Image (cartoon, helix red, strand yellow):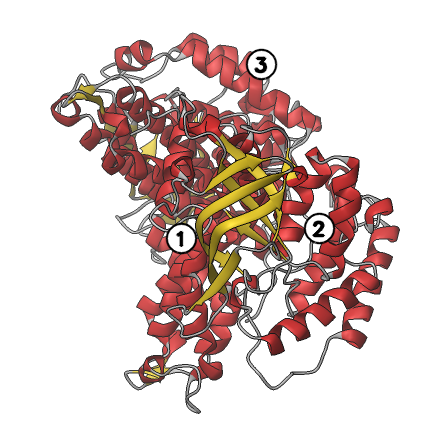
């Protein structure tokens, strides 16, 4: 080995401090991962459909936080660990690898929390952050409305100032855990006359127990629950729960979406979505036969699998390339802004292909005793649409990338 | 079967400087008018640009200091080659870089001392590998037969890049069934042995070369040629991938320029999602290719290529040439009637795409060879 490659090796090696930390995480996971509860656990935070599941996940998230493996990079005074982000990344990596249950309070951990840390007042930080981490305060998001899925500029829900309160009327849809949440990040129209429709919006940290707010669970295509429609009927929320100034809601919402799309760091960490990689698909396909031969010997299947592996590898390597500014100067932000589009579409196609590979059992569903892995892949494929549709559909994401990265004109 | 993917990718400040200066150089030397002015010329490049590249030290960048090089690995050439692809700047750089790697990896000390310094100073090398249309062929038709203490070559090698200007040929021949790399000087070739091909990519030059009757001294047989050969094929694939990635980005830029200026039915055509979304797809495909070439550049060194590096090179080639095929194809289509003309630059990219996919194996060839590395 040449001298220069030895230097490179050394730089790549994890420092002793980090690798000790990693060992600690692995050890903790080994001794603290809960036993199989005997009911189906959610693969994503959008599948918390019963009290039983909720209680289980709440207890688990608290345990992760109490052990110091959640919110590691958040400020210490608000329940965080005050450590460099790298530690959280390592903890997340190990939790993901070990397939521990998800940290379910994702709207808080990933979106509301970072937003409050970056732009909130001391009061807001004091009030909200710790409850997000412990799982005591569940957060939901009130952006999308019936008939205005990805088009946030068209939001109709009104919030009218009345003394020390706002009176809210309208409805929101796809509220994840809306029936369990204590707070909602709410985007509502405070000025219907604003010249530009974006200017009339405001952003609230709204209490869900306010009188006049009600929720109705939505049954998903999987037959399970996890979302609600949320109705506001003369609901009165304190004026003090507005974030920033009146009329600045659009800008704050866009910043929140940046966290959602992964372009901004700051999330508290934890695993929010069970990762399913090609290795899992390969394991599943191991025993399958097709046309009297082992499936994995079939040349067409092999070519398809290699294509998926190339795509998966590009996805994860691309996440690393984002951290190298000199390799991101052309088409600035292209990797960051396309991350959601790229990742969610890849997983959708990969999971769909898993069902194809199963052969006849691919037509069974969760609940059938002969369904492969208890119907894991069927649920995974169908639920994956929450990621290609939610948070801006893939088609809207493609518009965003086209317009913001390539400078293509709007419709 | 269950393997943990290698996710190493790094880029030093020095490499970033190389990338910046390579891009500036290629942009300055190779605007589209210049590219077009060279399409019908004999060599396809300007001799003074090649001399400047030699003077900048590019020919020695990936070679050891003891021969006059910069002591970096072949990965250092990736930003150069990507930039050349971006501006369609053609010189014998890629051919010569692979040939120099053949001597570095396949030669003994004496052979390295004999050829590497002259190549760093600008002597042009090229690989003569193909005997037929199959990059995956195990049969080698060109033979090397002993005669009076020397050896005699017999056979025609196909599509030897930059053969007409090459000083040194690295020829793959079969010595009684054993793959062997030999070094042939251009001066050894009889008149008429080089016949130029008509290539789909008019920026490129290649010829069939008849090596029949050329005498090879024993010291011109690369000592470790057979061992180096698989790695050289991978390095060829990687450099082609880097060039193709640059060209895919150039095709993308050409599309974006048109989509943001051309109006139809009263609107800029880039506002139509039927054009916007596939254009974004090109960006994503190109970005993946770019990720792979720099991943491979991170892993590769002067040692023989380990499994992860092989995977990286093959993924890079499969991804980059598919990305360019897609980009070139859509570039023509999205220019409408204009795209059907020779005057439209989309022509340059769709032709480059067809050429690039067949250098060192197409995407399916590499996926087929990836399968046992990844699945078994």
Q: Is residue A85 left or right of residue B53?
A: right
Label 2 neighbourhood size at 10 Å, few (<14), some (14-19), many (20+)?
many
* The one of B166 and A393 positioned closer to us in this rendering: A393
The reply to whether residue A248 is visible in this rendering is yes
Q: CA distance from mark 3 to mark 1?
A: 51 Å
Closer to viewer: mark 3 or mark 2: 2
Q: Is residue B211 left or right of residue A134?
A: left
Closer to viewer: mark 3 or mark 1: 1
Measured as percent of width and height from the top left, residue B225 is found at 52, 47
Which mark, residue A389? 1
* The one of B252 and B41 positioned closer to us in this rendering: B252
**Residue receiving disc 2:** A268
Question: Residue at left 51%, top 28%?
Answer: A332
Q: CA distance from mark 3 to mark 2?
A: 48 Å
**Residue receiving disc 3:** B56
Question: Residue at left 51%, top 39%?
Answer: A159
The reply to whether residue B222 is visible in this rendering is no
Measured as percent of width and height from the top left, residue B79 is found at 53, 28
Question: Residue at left 78%, top 59%?
Answer: A69
Q: Determine whether label 3 and label 2 are within 8 Å by CB.
A: no
Query: Element at badge 2?
Result: loop
Query: Element at badge 3?
Result: loop
Placement of B251 over or under A307, stated as above or below: above
Label 3 neighbourhood size at 10 Å, few (<14), some (14-19), many (20+)?
few
* Chain designation of label 3: B
* The one of B236 and A159 positioned closer to us in this rendering: A159
Examine the image and state in which quarter residue B194 appears: top left
Question: Residue at left 36%, top 36%?
Answer: A399
């Amino acid at each position: 080995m040449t001298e220069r490659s030895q230097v490179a090796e050394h730089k790549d090696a994890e420092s002793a401090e980090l690798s000790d930390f990693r060992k600690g995480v692995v050890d903790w996971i080994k001794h603290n991962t809960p036993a199989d509860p005997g009911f189906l656990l959610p693969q994503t935070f959008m599948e918390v459909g019963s009290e039983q599941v909720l209680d289980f996940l709440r207890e688990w998230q608290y345990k992760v936080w109490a052990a110091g493996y959640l919110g590691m990079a958040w400020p210490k005074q608000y329940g965080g660990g005050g450590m460099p982000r790298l530690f959280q990344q390592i903890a997340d990596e190990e939790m993901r690898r070990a397939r521990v249950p998800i940290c379910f309070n994702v709207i808080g951990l990933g979106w509301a929390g970072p937003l409050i840390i970056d732009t909130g007042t001391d009061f807001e930080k004091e009030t909200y952050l710790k409850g997000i981490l412990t799982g005591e305060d569940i957060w939901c998001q009130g952006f999308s409305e019936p008939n205005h899925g990805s088009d946030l500029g068209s939001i109709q829900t009104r919030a009218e100032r009345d003394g020390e309160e706002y009176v809210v009327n309208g409805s929101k849809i796809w509220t994840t855990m809306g029936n369990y949440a204590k707070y909602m990040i709410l985007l509502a129209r405070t000025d219907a006359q604003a010249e530009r429709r974006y200017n009339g919006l405001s952003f609230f940290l709204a209490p869900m127990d306010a009188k006049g707010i009600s929720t109705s669970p939505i049954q998903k295509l999987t037959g399970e629950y996890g979302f609600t429609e949320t109705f506001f009927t003369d609901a009165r929320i304190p004026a003090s729960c507005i974030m920033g100034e009146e009329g600045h809601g659009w800008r704050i919402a866009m910043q929140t979406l940046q966290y959602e799309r992964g372009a901004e760091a700051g999330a508290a960490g934890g695993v929010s979505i069970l990762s399913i990689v090609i290795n899992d698909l390969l394991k599943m396909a191991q025993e399958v036969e097709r046309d009297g031969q082992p499936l994995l010997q079939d040349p067409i299947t092999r070519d398809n699998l290699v294509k998926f592996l190339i795509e998966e590898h590009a996805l994860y390597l691309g996440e690393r390339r984002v951290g190298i500014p000199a390799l991101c100067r052309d088409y600035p932000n292209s990797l960051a802004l396309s991350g959601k589009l790229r990742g969610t579409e890849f997983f959708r196609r990969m999971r769909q292909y898993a069902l194809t590979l199963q052969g006849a059992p691919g037509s069974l569903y969760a609940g059938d005793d002969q369904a492969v892995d208890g119907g894991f892949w069927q649920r995974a494929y169908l639920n994956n649409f929450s990621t290609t549709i939610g948070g801006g559909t893939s088609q809207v994401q493609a518009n965003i990338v086209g317009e913001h990265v390539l400078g293509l004109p709007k419709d | 079967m269950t393997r943990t993917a290698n996710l190493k990718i790094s880029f030093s400040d020095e490499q970033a400087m190389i990338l910046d200066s390579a891009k500036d150089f290629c942009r300055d030397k190779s605007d589209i008018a210049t590219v077009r002015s060279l399409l019908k010329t004999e060599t396809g490049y300007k001799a003074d640009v090649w001399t400047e590249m030699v003077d900048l030290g590019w020919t020695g960048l990936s070679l050891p200091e003891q021969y006059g090089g910069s002591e970096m690995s072949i990965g250092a050439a990736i930003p150069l080659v990507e930039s050349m692809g971006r501006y369609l700047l053609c010189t014998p750089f890629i051919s010569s870089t692979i040939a120099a790697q053949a001597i570095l990896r396949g030669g003994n000390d004496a052979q390295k001392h004999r050829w590497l310094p002259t190549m760093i100073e600008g002597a042009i090398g090229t690989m003569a590998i193909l005997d037929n249309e199959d990059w995956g062929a195990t049969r080698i038709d060109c033979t090397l037969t002993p005669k009076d203490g020397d050896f005699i070559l017999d056979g025609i090698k196909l599509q030897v890049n930059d053969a007409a200007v090459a000083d040194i040929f690295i020829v793959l021949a079969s010595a009684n069934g054993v793959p062997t790399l030999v070094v042939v000087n251009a001066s050894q070739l009889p008149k008429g042995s080089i016949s130029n091909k008509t290539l789909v990519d008019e920026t490129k030059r290649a010829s069939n070369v008849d090596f029949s009757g050329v005498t090879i001294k024993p010291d011109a047989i690369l000592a470790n040629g057979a061992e180096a050969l698989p790695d050289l094929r991978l390095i060829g694939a990687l450099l082609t991938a880097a060039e193709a990635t640059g060209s895919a980005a150039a095709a993308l830029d050409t599309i974006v320029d048109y989509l943001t200026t051309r109006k139809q039915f009263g609107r800029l055509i880039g506002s139509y999602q039927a054009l916007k979304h596939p254009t974004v797809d090109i960006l994503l495909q190109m970005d993946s290719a770019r990720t792979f070439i720099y991943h491979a550049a991170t892993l590769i060194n002067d040692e023989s290529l380990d499994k992860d590096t092989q995977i990286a090179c093959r993924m890079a080639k499969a991804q980059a040439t598919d990305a360019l095929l897609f980009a070139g194809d859509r570039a023509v289509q999205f220019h409408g009637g204009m795209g059907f003309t020779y005057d439209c630059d989309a022509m340059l990219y769709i032709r480059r795409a067809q050429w690039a996919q067949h250098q060192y194996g197409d995407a399916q060839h590499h996926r087929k060879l990836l399968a046992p590395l990844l699945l078994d």
